[in-house]
Image (cartoon, rainbow, N blue to C red):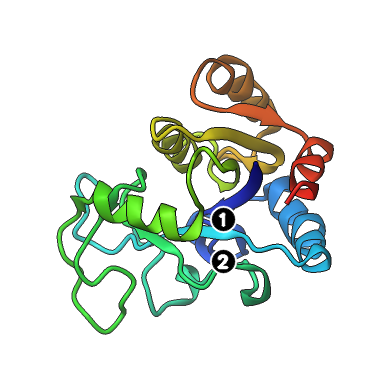
Amino acid sequence: MKAKIISIDFQNDFIAKGGHHYKPRPSVDFVKNILIPYLKNEGLKIAEIISDYRPPRFSDRSLSCHPGEWGYESGIPASVKEETAWIKCMNSPIWTRDNVGDPRQKPGIPYQDPKKFDEWILKTIGKPEDTEIILVGLTLDCCVLCVAPEFCFRGFNVKILKEAVDVYSGKQEEKEMLFKLVVANCWAKTISWNQAKKMLASK
């Protein structure tokens, strides 16, 4: 059983000062200064799920994560990430759109495409009988919590790396409460960095 890390929405609009959804969050420093150097040293790759949040989007007029703009760019270096990211356009990863991620084309209306998401999973992540999932990124109270059940319902054993996620506000008391009251009762187990390293060492 191999372990695969999946990063969610680790984009400038969330992680960098000046981003539309930026707030100080300890997990960002952890990913940049601990997780990424570790992956480089071990020769491991991280898969990415990122967002194209251009309008039109149902019930949302967000200015964030527009392809071609600085806020859309990923904070995961090319040297440690898989070649092809999955690009979603709603909180749940099964939502995509025509011209997703293409700044030269007008984006289509969001629609669900679980078949295409399944194809990306098989190619980039693997099969549930062979692969355990470790989720990192932003935010625990939204997109991370939407991604977790999609993998769980497909049969994957899903873990969330505690040091590598944060809630939208960045408040650690909210993060602890969410882990205690929601994550523990749902689709993923919480692991520490030491536990994650043991999983990754069995690659």
Label 1 belongs to which residue? 22
Residue 121 image point, x, y percent? 42, 53
- In-front residue for pair 65/135: 135
- Secondary structure beneath label 1: loop
Q: What is the spatial separation of the Cα atoms under label 2 and label 1, in whole angstroms?
A: 7 Å
Corner quadrant of residue 69: bottom left
Label 2 belongs to which residue? 18
Corner quadrant of residue 68: bottom left
Q: Residue furthest bottom?
A: 104
- Secondary structure beneath label 2: loop
Q: Residue at x 50, y 40 (%)?
A: 144
Name above or below for residue 86 compared with residue 84: above
Residue 177 image point, x, y percent? 62, 20
Type of the residue with mark 2: Gly
Type of the residue with mark 1: Tyr
Circles 2 and 1, Cβ within 8 Å, touching? The answer is yes
Quadrant including the N terminus: top right
Residue 97 image point, x, y percent? 22, 61
Name above or below for residue 35 compared with residue 153: below
Left or right of 91 in this view: 61: left
Q: Which mark is residue 158?
A: none
Left or right of 101 in this view: 202: right
- In-front residue for pair 56/152: 152
Residue 120 image point, x, y percent? 39, 58
Q: Residue furthest left?
A: 109
Mark 1 residue crowding within 10 angstroms, few (<14) / some (14–19) / many (20+): some
Name above or below for residue 181 compared with residue 44: above
Q: Residue at x 59, y 18 (%)?
A: 184
